[in-house]
């Protein structure tokens, strides 16, 4: 059913303005952004289809233009709008990390990484490069793997740290299985990278493991 044909109190825009954004379901929020849907499906059907394709809002936040293009009925204009909104969300969370030491707001770091990595269906190893005051310089995806393993090359992390003139780093990777528990391999990788980066006087401050709805700090566990 088109949005205009719904009772006024059931239209996402009116509900949002009257009751606040938190009152809307995921499909309603997305339908409000999409505005229209293809014939025979409608905007709510398209919103639900998109959420199912991406694995919910968390997956949508990590979706690429190619991922969105695979959803029938989602044209270039709608894809561009969705990607723009998701990028605004990521930048809004990253901005405070660039302006103050990351350890002034450790929970915000976890939220930022959950937003970036939490919904991905494949494993990604990323690095937050920090300046001498431990403010964020860049978050970069260094390596991408399968559901079970990622090949991480210490020399590439060292090279990038030197190029950015980083003084410290926070390592991060996701577990697509959803469980954020660090493995023995994660511990070994952390120590390998810590030793390699120490040679160029770059400190490893933490290694965060991102699951679905949870981010575990290996530093808090005494593993860094």
Image (spheres, helix red, strand yellow):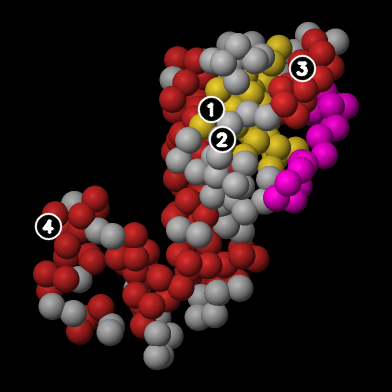
Please say if the residues under marks 1 and 2 sit with CB atoms less than 8 Å apart.
yes
- Rounded to the nearest angstrom, the CA distance separating label 1 from label 2 is 6 Å
Is residue 172 rendered to the left or right of residue 115?
right
- Rounded to the nearest angstrom, the CA distance separating label 4 from label 2 is 38 Å
Q: Residue at x 59, y 50 (%)?
A: 120
Q: Which residue is mark 2?
A: 180
Q: Which residue is mark 4?
A: 18
**Magenta residue span:** 143-161
- Rounded to the nearest angstrom, the CA distance separating label 3 from label 4 is 53 Å
Q: Residue at x 50, y 43 (%)?
A: 212
Quadrant of image for the C terminus = top right
Front tag of 3 and 4:
3
Q: Which residue is mark 1?
A: 216
The mark that comes first in sequence, 2 or 3, is 2
Residue 50 shows in this picture? yes
* Element at label 1: strand
- Residue 150 highlighted magenta (yes or no): yes
């Amino acid at each position: 059913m088109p949005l205009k044909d719904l009772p006024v109190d059931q239209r996402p825009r009116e509900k949002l303005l009257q009751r606040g954004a938190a009152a809307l379901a995921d499909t309603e929020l997305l339908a409000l952004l999409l505005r229209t849907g293809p014939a025979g499906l409608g905007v709510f059907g398209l919103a639900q289809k998109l959420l199912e394709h991406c694995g919910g809002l968390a997956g949508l936040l990590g979706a690429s233009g190619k991922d969105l293009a695979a959803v029938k009925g989602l044209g270039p204009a709608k894809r561009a709008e969705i990607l723009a909104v998701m990028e605004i969300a990521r930048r809004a969370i990253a901005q405070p990390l660039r302006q103050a030491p990351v350890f002034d707001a450790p929970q915000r770091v976890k939220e930022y990484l959950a937003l970036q990595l939490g919904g991905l269906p494949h494993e990604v190893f990323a690095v937050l490069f920090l300046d001498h005051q431990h403010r964020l310089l860049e978050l970069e995806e260094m390596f991408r793997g399968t559901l079970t393993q990622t090949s991480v090359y210490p020399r590439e992390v060292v090279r990038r740290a030197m190029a950015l003139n980083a003084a410290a780093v926070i390592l991060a990777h996701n577990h697509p299985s959803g469980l954020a528990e660090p493995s023995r391999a994660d511990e070994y990788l952390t120590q390998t990278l810590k030793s390699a980066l120490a040679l160029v006087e770059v400190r490893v401050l933490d290694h965060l493991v991102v699951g679905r709805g949870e981010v575990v700090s290996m530093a808090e566990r005494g593993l860094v």
